[in-house]
Image (cartoon, rainbow, N blue to C red):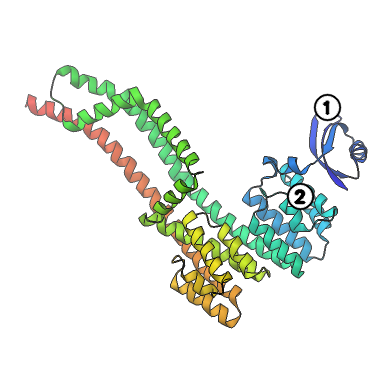
Amino acid sequence: MGAYQYQALKVNGNVSKGVIEADSERHARQLLREQGLIPTQVQTLTQQRAASSKSKVSAADLALLTRQLATLLAAGIPVEESLRGVSEQTEKDKVRELIIGVRSKVLEGYGLAQAMAQYPNAFPELYRATVGSGEQTGRLDVVLEKLADYTEKQQKTRQKVQQALIYPLLMIIVSTAIISFLLTFVVPKIIDVFTESGQTLPPMTQLLINLSQFIKSYGLYTLAAIILALIGFKKSLSNIKIKTAWHQVMLKLPIVSYLVKTINVARYIHTFGILFAAGVSVLETMRVSSSLVTNVVMRQAFDLATLRVREGSGISEALKETKFISPMAIHLIASGEKSGQLSDMMERSASHLDNEVNRLIETSLTLLEPMVILLMGAVVLFIVLATLLPIFSMEQLVA
């Protein structure tokens, strides 16, 4: 049985699109007619089509389908039936297409991890490796429960950050628009009154005039130049030498450095704990964990740690050489190696780092709002003072 993408007409004339499972294209058309639809186009849901941008799913969708799949498998339902159940529960077409595509591969004889590997944009390497190890050990339901916990935790953190950023970003946009309007239309008219009087303007007022004239004459060009520069910079990061140099700079910036290191180390240790607990070999666990580190310099250090372990070094000893993992975490990892509870110790280290990351994010976001208010207030104060200073000077002359 395969998956078919269809387009059909309803009785009221509206167009219906979706995916249906059938033994053949003819069977798919027959099933659609039985549903009261008139099929106008039916084609195989090919791997190339499903692996396109339509196969990408959000973190929230991935977390939800993982939890649903884990729940069904824990109830003893076979993989293919669990996938069918998840596809029937989802309301989003692209998620349904993805799950049906995976189920089609499973029905063809692929393992679940192999089927998911056909859609790398939807299922990251950590996800596929963990599912693969769960299949090999016969603990797929347990592994998926851990994956569901992990993806949900990541999604909650991401959602918390996004929600906390809404108000400061809205303030920045509105304040920038108001200040630009004042400098472009209001301030020039007020300043014209003073310039026509021929009086000598204070330096602050003259600076405001120059700034206003610059924004009025070159504001759009400056904005376009900034956007082009950002696009160019982003494209330049495709060059590994430039990207490495930039990531090296990030590791030297005071606050950014701590944030980048903590987030990446937490991701590495979390991944290590999940994969190792699922039964993945140490070297493969370290390789996959390292591949998920976003900072190039840190990734190279963790790759070197993998090489050291391959050559016979202990895990804690090799990770200590990276200089990125805290002494406390190294101590826990070393203790886990000796006691045979490495995955548990990794989970403890990851939990501690998660709390540290959450605390850091919450503190940063808490400070962001008053900082934005102070900055915008300072700009408005500058405009007000620069506008009022000539009035005070004129009153002194009259007196």
Is residue 270 visible in the rendered image? The answer is yes
Is residue 358 visible in the rendered image? The answer is no
The nearer-to-camera label among 2 and 1 is 2
**Horizontal arrangement in the rendering, residue 391 relative to residue 111 (left or right):** left
Amino acid type indicated by mark 1: Gly
Amino acid type indicated by mark 2: Ile
Circle 1 SS class? loop
Image coordinates of residue 52 in percent, x first then y, are: 69, 41
Label 1, residues with CA under 10 Å away: few <14, some 14-19, many ≥20: few
- Nearer to me, 120 or 14: 120
Quarter assignment of residue 187: top left
Q: Residue furthest bottom?
A: 339
The residue that appears at 56% across and 78% down in the rendered structure is: 336
- Nearer to me, 96 or 228: 228
Q: Residue furthest top?
A: 196
The residue that appears at 54% across and 61% down in the rendered structure is: 267
Image coordinates of residue 375 in percent, x first then y, are: 32, 43
Circle 2 SS class? helix
Quarter assignment of residue 386: top left
- Nearer to me, 224 or 312: 312
Q: Name the residue under label 1.
A: 13
Q: As displayed, is residue 161 above or below residue 26?
A: below
Q: Give the label on residue 99, or none.
A: 2
**Horizontal arrangement in the rendering, residue 335 relative to residue 105 (left or right):** left
Q: As displayed, is residue 207 above or below residue 195?
A: below
Label 2, residues with CA under 10 Å away: few <14, some 14-19, many ≥20: many
